[in-house]
Image: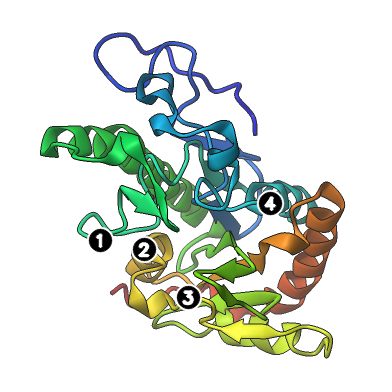
Amino acid sequence: MDDSAAQNVTGPGLLHSGEPLPYELYNERAGGRLLLVCDHGSNRVPDSLEMLGLSDAELARHIGWDIGAADVTYRLSDRLGAPAVLASYSRLVIDCNRALDHPGLILAESDHTLVPGNVGLSETQRQSRVDEFFEPYHAAIADQIERMRVLCGPGEAPVAVSIHSFTPVFDGIERPWHVGVLWNIDPRLAEPLIARLREDNDLIVGDNEPYSAREGFGHTLETQGDGNGLANALIEIRQDLIDTHPGAAEWAERLAVVLEETLVDEALYRPRKAV
């Protein structure tokens, strides 16, 4: 992940001088009509939070980030010439893909692992994380959408795709899907993506699996996508398929081909009534 956009922050905030901004803009000025976002691409914790009381090994697990998701996002961005916005800090600091009232926004325990730095937080401490990480990340996405609306021209809007990954086994249950496509109320992008992925008989493709975007697991696209009337989809890739650079490269190319085939539909760029 590119650390070039570092803060010059001093004072009582959680982010200190020299630490990365809460978001990364990758290929920020790329043209095109596709916006990529990655909510869980980093397991970084700001120095002020002292690793949340966890070890490097614990933060490297799936509880700290979506393993391989950022690698795929960068490669897709380069391959498709699409700008990308990535969260720069661990989902354990605050989960930018959860609503502010969601119980999973700041977890004191994740997959049976206690997160000491999240135990007993005051409302002031929680609000600091919202103000310093959550809100700037979502503001960066909103700004990028508005920039791309201008590039698209009158009556058109970009398409938004969020890249995630999921652990092969969760709570003792094996997950057979190689990839899942999550969506809520707008099927324009998700349904053709699912259909094209299922043309490969070797793939097990989930429709709102292993999570459902209708159950609070797709906040970013619910607000930034559906909320702006944009065609959108969240793509979940199983982590053991992209936990190496070759695996991430293979899946980025696979998704690039499927997206290229799907994004030729001009109807995708006509925004619907925002919800």
Does residue 26 lie above or below 262 as drawn? above
Q: Residues within 10 Å of mark 4 (few under 14, many from 20)?
A: many
For the residues labelled 3 and 1, the Cα–Cα distance comes to 15 Å
Instruction: Say which label, 3 or 4, has the lower sequence index.
Output: 4
Q: Residue 48's spot in the image, x, y percent? A: 36, 20
Q: Nearer the viewer, residue 132 or 63?
A: 63
Residue type indicated by callout 1: His
Q: Quadrant of residue 122?
A: top left
Disc 4 designates what residue? 68
Identify which amino acid the numbered label 2 is placed on: His
If you read the primary sequence from the N terminus, does the residue marked by circle 4 or circle 2 appear first?
A: 4
Q: Can you see residue 272?
A: no
| Quadrant position of residue 126 | top left
**Residue 211: which numbered mark, if any?**
3
Say if residue 249 shows up in the picture. Answer: yes
Task: Look at 36% across and 25% down and name the residue there.
Answer: 49
Q: Is residue 128 left or right of residue 258?
A: left
Give the CA distance from mark 4 to mark 2. Answer: 20 Å
Q: Judging from the image, what secondary structure is the residue with disc 2 in?
A: helix
Q: Earlier in the sequence, mark 2 or mark 1?
A: 1
Mark 1 neighbour density, 10 Å: few (under 14) some (14–19) many (20 or more): few
Q: Residue 176: image x %, image y %?
A: 67, 81
In the depicted structure, whether residue 68 falls above or below residue 205: above
Q: CA distance from mark 2 to mark 3?
A: 12 Å
Q: Earlier in the sequence, mark 3 or mark 1?
A: 1
Marks 2/3 in contact by CB < 8 Å: the verdict is no
Q: Amino acid at mark 4?
A: Gly
Residue underneath mark 1: 102
Q: Distance from label 2 to label 1 (Cα)?
A: 10 Å
> Which residue does the numbered mark 2 point to in the structure image?
219
